[in-house]
Amino acid sequence: MSKPFFSIGIIFKNEIRCLERCLKSLQPLKSAIPCEIVMADTGSTDGSREIAEQYADVLFDFEWVDDFSAARNAVMDRCSGQWYFSIDADEWLLEDIAELVQFSKLKKAPRDYCGVMVRNYKTTELEKGEHYVDFTAIRMAKLSTGMRYSGRIHEKWVQSTGEGVFVSILGKTWLGHDGYAYFSQEAVMQKHDRNMALLKKKMEDDPKDLQTYIECMDSSKSLDENCGDYARQALEVFFADQERWGHFGGVVYRGIVSVASLHELPELEEWISLSKDYSKSIFVNIDVAFDAHTHYYQKDDYEEAIRWGEMYRKGIADYRADQFDHVELIRGVVERVSPYWERKIMVSLVNCYLNCKEYDKALTALQELTAETLDAEQARFVTLMIMQLHRETEFDTPALMMSYWETLSKELPEDAEEDEKAKARRNLDSFTKEAYGVFTPKYRKEEQKKEGFIRYSYTVFLPLAGKDDLGDSAVLLETKDPGELTEKLNQIENLDSLPIHVLSHAMMQGVEFPMPGKPLQLEEMSRLVNRLLQERESFFTLVEKIMSGNYGRTLQSLCWAKELITAALKNNDWAAGKIPEGKMITLSMDGPAESHEDLVARGMNIARAFAKVERKYLPLCYAQDILRREALFVLPPLHRFGWYCAQAFQALDRGDQVGYVRLLREGLSDCESAKDVAEFLLEHIPDVKPQEPSAELTALAEQVRAMLERFSTDDPMLEALKQSEAYQKVAYLIEGSAVPVRGGILQ
């Protein structure tokens, strides 16, 4: 083997999880350039050493002495190459090695030290995920310099004078790192405690080393409530010797602003303001800008949030275009550089633009957001913002919504991972939930009052007609003609898929429901009624509409009316209609204020409608022998009350207030669950006069009376005649008896 160009140094201990991945990633480089791998085992017991033996050119044991520099220097002592290249066991060399190959062919390198890029992944998704931070690490040194590592932890090469080194940056050479991604909380705390112990020793060795304070902030800010002290100490050391530490300004302000933001320190805005002195720093333009935007956004200072948000976006663009000082990344980590953070800024920026009426910018930003990359909360928020932009402008937002919907509803391939499928379902559910909300009468009423209102939000879904229930619902809500509505509704296969308020709109416009040719099961009706109850105000308006129509024309319409009116009976606020100690009051029930008289009138209308529908419904479901007072015990409680309620209202219509009260009290004793209704009705007994019989009814009574006179009192035919329908209708006129009854149900 010729003399190695690279001596690749690795120290490890119990790295069985990742060591072979690291060593395999180096094989393409070994094939392209003469390399040796020199490894130090600091005490493995998990089989890592056996893995190392398969790949290492030099492998030795090194007793751990709580000093990373000592271990790395021991590795360097055994290297024979021209350049030393340090890699950790939980890192791996990414596939693009072209820059390293080109570097090996240089006759003379511009510097004796080189930095490479490191992407530190925060989750086990690694490159498939979006949680990572980037930094530049000085990992290459010319061995002929005799340079040594210094520092117990976060070790680095320093010159004999104690000063740092001048570095060339290989900006296209990347190492992946996932050490923190696999840590349990317990492991995180163990590593934190170990690192902080070493950093404190390092601080004792040199209390004026700004880099140590920066490392203390970075290591402790998520786990240590006292990290604010490190931030203040770092700023003090920085100001005390700016001539020495001036080039660290960007990373210092990144660190102290991050700590202040995380722990809500009172110095936050002051420190944000001071960072402007480093306006060219990638740390200020990305990390400080992110925290500043978030802070002002949470304060509803949208103009300032926009300024910092746009600064962040420019910083990200410069970073992606490689237009920044790579040397800065040697001093620290750019924390908010991943697409995850960029997307968070984009979403909140759109909201800022909308609040500041900068609609053009809002539209552009929404067009740049990619729906499949959003999480469920962002999908919900973006849906709301597109609808707001639609409501307040005449932009072509329906096209934007169509594109957004197409992405969210796109069917994933069968071999897609379950996590990916679950995320897609969550996003679509979030979108649908918010979209359905704009169809409610309450939402539409509130929209009209909003500043800048131009059009209803639901109309943004019109292009989805024929593609999605939202589009069909928007078309239905725009349609007023009952015939057209009936035709369109007949094309809907599943009514449960529609926003329920669209169905309510159709019925309010006069559509017959259930529609002829599309009968519903009773449980389907019950389900639809329960959905209608979600908005009480519009529900009771619909019930009043149904009550005013001829709802008993068919069995389907009778059953539908029964479900609606029974639900109204159960959900009406009967206590609100009770007399408040002899004086009038004004109440509010999920909508505009209603007077006491209005509440009483509504209660009486619901009760009368209930009596009417029960009078029609009970004979269809139960035999005549059941619908007698002595047999009522077999009926469900509410139907028992319905039987009494029907008779009570007929007694009232005849002017028999005593009978009205008696029947309601009997009904109450038979059905305790109707107590509120019965008490309300007993408290509101109208002044009534007996109704005069019609001429037709009087004539019928005379005919029946004449027939009765033909039979003797003991003639069996007389009893048969009294059971006839004609006699039952006019018995009270002939006999002066109580209310006319047929089959136990008042006529």
Image: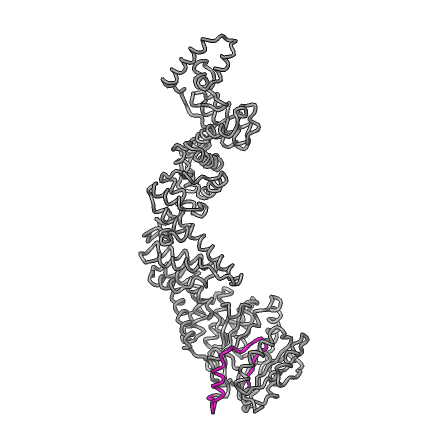
Magenta segment boundaries in residue numbering: 83-110
Foreground residue, 570 or 295? 570
Instruction: State the residue at coordinates (44%, 60%).
Output: 298
Is residue 334 in view from this perspective? Answer: yes
Q: Is residue 85 magenta?
A: yes
Percent of width and height locating residue 671: 55, 30
Is residue 331 in view from this perspective? Answer: no
Percent of width and height locating residue 676: 51, 32
Q: Is residue 655 left or right of residue 23?
A: left
- The image quadrant where one finds the N terminus is bottom right
Percent of width and height locating residue 70: 62, 83
Foreground residue, 415 or 633? 415
- The image quadrant where one finds the C terminus is top left
Q: Is residue 21 left or right of residue 352?
A: right
Q: Is residue 201 magenta?
A: no
Does 743 sit above or below residue 137? Answer: above
